[in-house]
Amino acid sequence: MPQADGMLLLSIFGIAVNGYAAYKLSEGNSLNERVLNWHLLEDVLGWVAVFIVSIVLMFKPWAILDPILSIGFTLFIFFNVIRNLKQTLMLFLQATPDRAQLERIRDDLLSNEHVSDLHHFHIWSLDGERNVMTVHLVLVGDVSTEHIQTLKNDVQRSLKKYNFEHTTVEFEFADEQCRDEAQGN
């Protein structure tokens, strides 16, 4: 027979500790913070269920409630793990965070009169919140070195609204072979 008094005291302690930790993490935006906060909220819900079952057990000797609660809560956690698995997997695989944003950035870069094409264009997320971008921009015809500084400023200005953590932009002249393609990459 479960010890209802001990369950009640432990559940109050669990609700307080995990509830406080979940509250402190509730403003996090990174995937790590969100997953950890979700885990703490699951713990709080589990302790609330233990609290309720312990009160019921004080009045009714339904020992079956304890294993039913364990199975139910395990299924609840499993469902939420599966639900968040895709986002976590995409982060580990360094997948492109947002295809629509990728197209907007591509259009912004190609809208510059000195850029004829782009390749080796990649965006990935470091943590679900901060993104990184690399791109090779092919310049039109003869772009003077004086125009390159203006072009750098234009590119920097157009990328600023996307709040990248880091960007790498490589310029290639129209008649120049891409260094990466020449090496077979």
Image (cartoon, grey):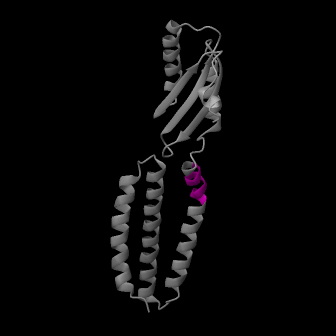
| Quadrant housing residue 78 | bottom right
Give the quarter of the figure containing the N terminus: bottom left
**Residue 163 in view in this figure:** no
Residue occupying image coordinates x 56% and y 75%:
72
**Residue 150 in view in this figure:** yes
In this rendering, position of residue 14 left or right of residue 155: left
The percent coordinates of residue 119 (x first, y second) are: 64, 28
Determine whether 168 is above or below 19 in the image: above
Determine whether 2 is above or below 117 in the image: below
The percent coordinates of residue 16 (x first, y second) are: 34, 66
Residue occupying image coordinates x 38% and y 81%:
7
| Quadrant housing residue 10 | bottom left
Nearest the viewer among 78 and 181 is 181
Does the segment drawn in magenta span residue 85? yes
Residue occupying image coordinates x 55% and y 53%:
88
The percent coordinates of residue 50 (x first, y second) are: 44, 77
Does the segment drawn in magenta span residue 166? no
Determine whether 84 is above or below 168 in the image: below
Nearest the viewer among 8 and 35 is 35
Region rendered in magenta? 83-90
The percent coordinates of residue 139 (x first, y second) are: 61, 15
Give the quarter of the figure containing the C terminus: top right
